[in-house]
Image (tube, rainbow, N blue to C red):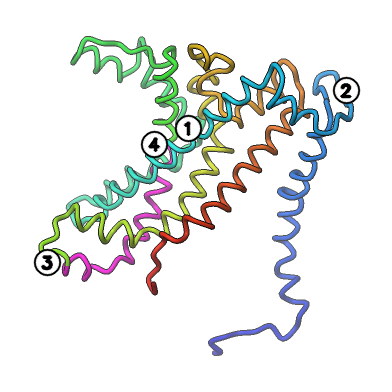
């Protein structure tokens, strides 16, 4: 058997790639193109009206009476994304390192920790909605019995925002752990043993050996978690807080848990039904994501340590 198999025909490789090209064209590139076209119209979903306005939808978001609301939503999205990615990867790395130790029942621990990955965002949001219900939630029952307090998790702006971040981190914990557990299998045990002989403690071995060796996986997970925070958080936010509550001035232009992807649905399918404005905001999210990805590849990849470095 040849080690390096090659195609004898130039047509066959393209035929094998054709199904992937068709799927990308139908479900990714064509809808993206349509979104850019739609963003140049002022359209109403319910009245079925459509008027060409050029770049007016983009101007409307960042200048004029609606600017404060959209700028607040953009800031909230970046804060939410930074917390979800930062906390999510940090907690997942620590927990995966602990779960990879050879202890009794380790497989059961790993299974229970990975379990949230199988849940949809809507189910994860429902679980948190019941757990943190101010009146009947199990969390408040425990806090009242221990400290005599019953926080209004869903009504207090900062608590509601923290709750959405916590739910998102918990939802992604299993996904991140699967990849970290796999990456930990490739960390040479000899490095840890040699460091232990030299007197390095567990914390030093974690930061000096484990973290650098996991940097390629962290680099990959950074983008997948960022994609979740920017594009896939709608279901969880809608179930837990419905985008609210409204914060104190100057953060009273929109709900404090309203992210850009949630605002897209409000603009496109809410009371105004302005699908052109929703498409413009969706394109802004896409541009932000591309810029962050390019910056990360440009500067963040320098800190990634591969095995042959």
Identify the residue at horizontal 14%, vertical 56% (top origin): 201
Q: Name the disc covering residue 79, or none.
A: 1
Sooner in the amino-acid sequence: mark 3 or mark 4: 4
Q: CA distance from mark 2 to mark 3?
A: 73 Å
- Vertical comparison of 192 with 156: above or below: below
Q: Name the disc covering residue 198, or none.
A: 3
Q: Nearer the viewer, mark 2 or mark 3?
A: 3
Q: Percent position (x, y) of residue 275?
A: 76, 27
Q: Nearer the viewer, mark 1 or mark 2?
A: 1
Question: Could you classify mark 1 by the number of other residues whose Cα lies within 10 Å: few (under 14), some (14-19), or many (20 or more)?
Answer: few
Question: Could you classify mark 3 by the number of other residues whose Cα lies within 10 Å: few (under 14), some (14-19), or many (20 or more)?
Answer: few
Identify the residue at horizontal 54%, vertical 14% (top origin): 252
**Secondary element at tag 4:** helix
Q: Percent position (x, y) of residue 123?
A: 48, 30
Q: Residue furthest front?
A: 63
Q: Name the disc covering residue 49, or none.
A: 2
- Vertical comparison of 131 with 86: above or below: above
Q: CA distance from mark 1 to mark 4?
A: 17 Å
Of 66 and 2, the residue lying toward us: 66
**Secondary element at tag 2:** strand
Q: CA distance from mark 1 to mark 2?
A: 36 Å
Q: CA distance from mark 3 to mark 4?
A: 37 Å
Query: Residue 139's quadrant in the figure?
Result: top left
Identify the residue at horizontal 85%, vertical 18% (top origin): 47
Residues drawn in magenta: 171-194
Sooner in the amino-acid sequence: mark 1 or mark 3: 1
Query: Which residue is disc 4 drawn over?
Result: 170
**Secondary element at tag 3:** loop
Sooner in the amino-acid sequence: mark 4 or mark 2: 2
């Amino acid at each position: 058997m040849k080690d390096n198999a090659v195609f004898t025909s130039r047509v066959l490789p393209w035929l094998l790639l054709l199904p992937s090209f068709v799927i990308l064209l139908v479900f990714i590139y064509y809808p993206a193109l349509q979104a850019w076209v739609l963003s140049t119209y002022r359209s109403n979903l319910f009245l079925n009206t459509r008027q060409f306005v050029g770049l007016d939808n983009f101007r409307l978001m960042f200048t004029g009476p609606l600017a404060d609301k959209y700028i607040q939503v953009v800031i909230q999205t970046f804060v939410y994304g930074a917390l979800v990615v930062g906390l999510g990867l940090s907690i997942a790395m620590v927990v995966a390192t602990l779960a990879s130790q050879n202890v009794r029942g380790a497989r059961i621990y790993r299974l229970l920790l990975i379990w949230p990955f199988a849940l949809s965002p809507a189910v994860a949001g429902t679980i948190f909605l019941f757990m943190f219900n101010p009146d009947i939630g199990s969390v408040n029952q425990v806090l009242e019995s221990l400290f005599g307090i019953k926080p209004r998790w869903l009504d207090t702006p900062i608590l509601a925002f923290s709750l959405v971040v916590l739910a998102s981190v918990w939802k992604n914990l299993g996904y991140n752990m699967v990849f970290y557990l796999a990456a930990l299998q490739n960390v040479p045990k000899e490095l840890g043993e040699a460091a232990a002989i030299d007197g390095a403690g567990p914390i030093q071995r974690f930061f000096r050996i484990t973290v650098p060796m996991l940097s390629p996986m962290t680099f990959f997970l950074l983008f997948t978690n960022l994609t979740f925070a920017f594009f896939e958080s709608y279901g969880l936010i809608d179930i837990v807080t419905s985008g609210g509550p409204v914060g104190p001035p100057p953060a009273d232009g929109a709900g404090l848990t309203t992210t850009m992807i949630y605002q897209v649905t409000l603009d496109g399918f809410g009371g105004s039904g302005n699908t052109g404005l929703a498409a413009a905001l969706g394109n802004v999210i896409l541009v932000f994501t591309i810029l962050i990805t390019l910056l990360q590849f440009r500067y963040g990849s320098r800190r990634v340590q591969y095995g042959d470095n």
